[in-house]
């Protein structure tokens, strides 16, 4: 529902306009006649107090922009992942359409990974794992969050996890656990930024995004939008999105610490928050292209171009888009034989074709 303004909303602005027009008229008149009244200490105190009080509506408007209200109708910020579970009758998973030269009938590698990568490794399992039911697959092919998947890998509860580059803290955790990792790139993906579809801004430069998330740029009008404060949402530490934000986007620039409500745990949450913030259009968020456009679709947001370049499979494959994340199959260095075979298959022709058909960008 759109915001509605009443006379009550406009009344403070009438007061501030009347007060400051009177002050400016008096200053202008005194400058013309060349005589400025001498004010005593008490009079000066009253004048400063009135000036501060007159600015209260500005503060109220700023505070209103900082309040967060969920105004979207979705009951959950996350999508229904059942449609991507392997061996289900109604599945949205990609398939090759022909037989492949590898299949597992026992000692199945245990797969896990980021939520956004679930359609990839779920499709891999459905293609390669034979003699398995959906119920059995749920124990072998798991999905949660990037931190959970990585933790299961270093504690030997998963054999391969599919995710973007691990964070510095995750690599340190593996080192403390005396687990040596092997990172194998299997594809690429765009790291994207999005706004409410009614926001007039369609493109930001790399420097503008960095400046916004350093809190150096705080108004949309500074980057071609309306005179509104920018509300830059962030993801939780060690999530795949946050690690990509720190390493791909900010690089050597320090991210400003987010206001509490502007740090979002779930991948779907940040999309809904940008779409539904207080019925306004001034929020900004980020995630991965495939998740945003294919898995968690929200018609109230739009992707931004970066440096004028649209994030799509062509600009990812040819390296034109500025923020391209590598997608890895990560395993412990001491792999099982079947784990080695699975990763080699994913790097091969059929595996890369399956990644492309899923909607990611393969290596070939």
Image (tube, rainbow, N blue to C red):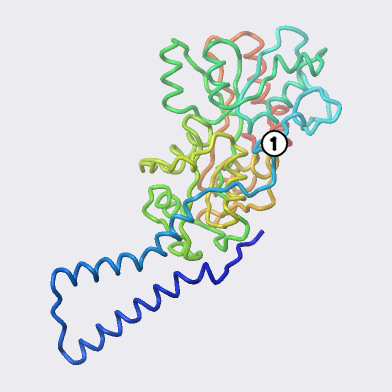
Residue closer to the observer: 186 or 56 = 56
Q: Is residue 291 left or right of residue 250?
A: right
Residue closer to the observer: 351 or 190 = 190
Residue closer to the observer: 159 or 260 = 260
Most extreme residue toward the bottom, as rendered? Answer: 33
Q: Position of residue 201 (x, y in %)?
A: 54, 61
Residue closer to the observer: 257 or 203 = 257
Q: Is residue 86 left or right of residue 268?
A: right
Using the rendered view, name the quadrant where residue 289 is placed.
top right
User: Residue at left 65%, top 24%?
Assistant: 143
Using the rendered view, name the quadrant where residue 142 is placed.
top right
Most extreme residue toward the right, as rendered? Answer: 89
Q: Position of residue 258 (x, y in %)?
A: 43, 42
Using the rendered view, name the quadrant where residue 96 is placed.
top right
Q: Is residue 68 left or right of residue 215?
A: right
Q: Relative to residue 315, is residue 43 depicted above or below? A: below
Q: Relative to residue 196, is residue 190 depicted above or below? A: above
Q: Give the class, few, some or many, for how many residues have Cα within 10 Å of label 1's Cα (few <14, many ≥20).
A: some
Label 1 secondary element: loop
Q: Quadrant of the N terminus?
A: bottom right
> How many numbered markers are drawn?
1
Q: Position of residue 93 (x, y in %)?
A: 77, 31
The residue at which mark 1 appears reads as 79
Q: Position of residue 195 (x, y in %)?
A: 57, 53
Q: Quadrant of the C terminus?
A: top right
User: Residue at left 63%, top 13%?
Assistant: 339
User: Residue at left 66%, top 48%?
Assistant: 72
Q: Relative to residue 337, is residue 46 depicted above or below? A: below
């Amino acid at each position: 529902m759109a915001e509605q303004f009443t006379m009550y909303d406009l009344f403070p602005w009438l007061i501030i306009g009347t007060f400051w027009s009177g002050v400016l008229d008096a200053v202008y008149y005194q400058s013309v006649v060349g005589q400025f009244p001498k004010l005593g200490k008490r009079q000066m105190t009253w004048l400063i107090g009135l000036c501060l009080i007159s600015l209260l509506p500005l503060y109220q408007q700023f505070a209103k922009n900082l309040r967060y209200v969920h105004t979207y109708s979705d009951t959950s910020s996350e999508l229904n992942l059942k449609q991507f579970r392997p061996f289900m009758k109604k599945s949205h998973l990609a398939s090759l359409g022909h037989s492949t030269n590898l299949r597992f009938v026992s000692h199945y590698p245990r797969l896990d990974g980021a939520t956004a990568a679930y359609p990839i490794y779920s499709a891999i399992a459905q293609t390669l794992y034979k003699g398995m039911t959906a119920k059995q697959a749920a124990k072998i092919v798991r999905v949660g969050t990037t931190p959970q998947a990585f933790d299961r890998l270093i504690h030997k509860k998963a054999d391969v996890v599919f995710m973007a580059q691990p964070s510095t803290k995750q690599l340190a955790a593996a080192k403390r656990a005396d687990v040596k990792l092997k990172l194998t790139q299997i594809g690429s993906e765009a790291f994207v930024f999005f706004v409410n579809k009614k926001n007039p801004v369609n493109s930001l430069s790399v420097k503008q995004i960095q400046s916004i998330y350093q809190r150096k740029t705080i108004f949309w009008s500074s980057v071609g939008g309306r005179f509104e404060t920018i509300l830059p949402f962030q993801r939780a530490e060690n999530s795949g999105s946050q690690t990509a934000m720190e390493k791909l986007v900010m690089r050597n620039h320090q991210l400003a610490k987010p206001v509490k409500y502007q740090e979002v745990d779930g991948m779907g949450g940040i999309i809904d928050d940008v779409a539904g913030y207080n019925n306004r259009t001034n929020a900004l968020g980020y995630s991965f292209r495939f998740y945003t456009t294919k898995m968690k679709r929200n018609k109230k947001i739009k992707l931004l171009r970066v440096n004028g370049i649209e994030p799509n499979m062509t600009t990812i494959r040819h390296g034109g888009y500025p923020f391209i994340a590598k997608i890895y199959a990560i395993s412990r260095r001491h792999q099982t034989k079947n784990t080695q075979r699975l990763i080699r298959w994913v790097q091969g022709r059929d595996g890369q074709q399956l990644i492309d058909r899923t909607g990611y960008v393969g290596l070939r």
